[in-house]
Image: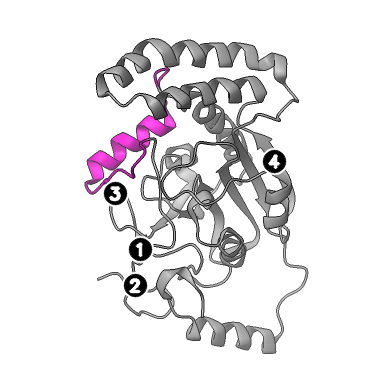
Amino acid sequence: MLRNAVTNEPVTTERGYAYIGRAPLPPRVVHREGARELSQSILNPSLGDPDYLVRRRRRELLENWIAQLPERELAVLDVGGRLQPYRPLLGKRAGHYIALDPVFEGLLDVAGVGECLPFHDASFDLALCTQMLNYASSPAQVVDEIHRVLKPGGTVLLTVAAIFPRLHDMRWNFMPDGLQLLLRNFTEIELVPEGHSIAGLCRSINWFFESFLRSERLRRYAGMLLYPVFNLAGTWLDRFSSGKSKFATNYACRARKPAATQPATHKERKKNRRRNTERRTPAAGHCE
């Protein structure tokens, strides 16, 4: 039985958010091999993938940011990480890697919700949160919890959808100003579109067809003939819309938790220990 890392209580698995893949309905990825295959398709998208443009750009951005992390083993938390597609980018830096998601399947380590993470304060050097906040019950609470469990000077890498066809339990879309508000407690915030306006338009066209082609055969033909054309066009033409992101469909972000300015007093350490001891894993993703 999975237990809370702080209280040793049994971990609940009520849904606070849900991971959604490219399908209109969330795929069940119970077996680890199936999860690895889906993870690889996200990390290394094919030209026939309607999400090729944003996934290719996301990998480039994350690779660049991860290369700037300290070259040592890191404690890593992947919030919404039952597939862990970007774990391979960390290489030897992934010293202690924990993936958390409400659905205990795939490559998951801990079942829980991002709104109330079952970990001590200042436990992780790096937090990943890719394409998950759009499905959270409370995105602000998830971000605040990530801030809490990061060590001073720790980094969060997150990606979100900005303009996207609504899936069956997608709750939020995020614009740069909204992300800045969510990350108000972080410093050194860097927001980058995962493709500018032309790439965004090409990706939106892909998803227009993906949403309305009901036949599996037609979708297969679209993946062989139609999506590669728009993906190649978006890759080549997007250079002409550099700096113009009104139609960007996704954003990636890097932010840092401020470094501690002075050590905690005895009273503050005692208060933190009491809070960690009293912390409970809640139902439906709400901290007590």
The answer to if 45 sits in the magenta stretch is yes
Q: Is residue 211 above or below residue 236?
A: below
Residue at numbered disc 3: 106
Q: Amino acid at mark 4?
A: Leu
Residue at numbered disc 2: 11
Mark 2 or mark 3, which has the lower sequence index?
A: 2
Mark 4 or mark 1, which has the lower sequence index?
A: 1
Whether residue 125 can be seen here: yes
Q: CA distance from mark 1 to mark 2?
A: 7 Å
Q: CA distance from mark 2 to mark 3?
A: 17 Å
Residue at numbered disc 1: 111
Q: Is residue 236 above or below residue 82?
A: above
Q: Secondary structure at mark 2?
A: loop
The answer to if 85 sits in the magenta stretch is no
Q: Amino acid at mark 1?
A: Ala
Q: Amino acid at mark 2?
A: Val
Q: Residue 179 at what x, y percent from top left?
A: 68, 49
Residue at numbered disc 4: 191
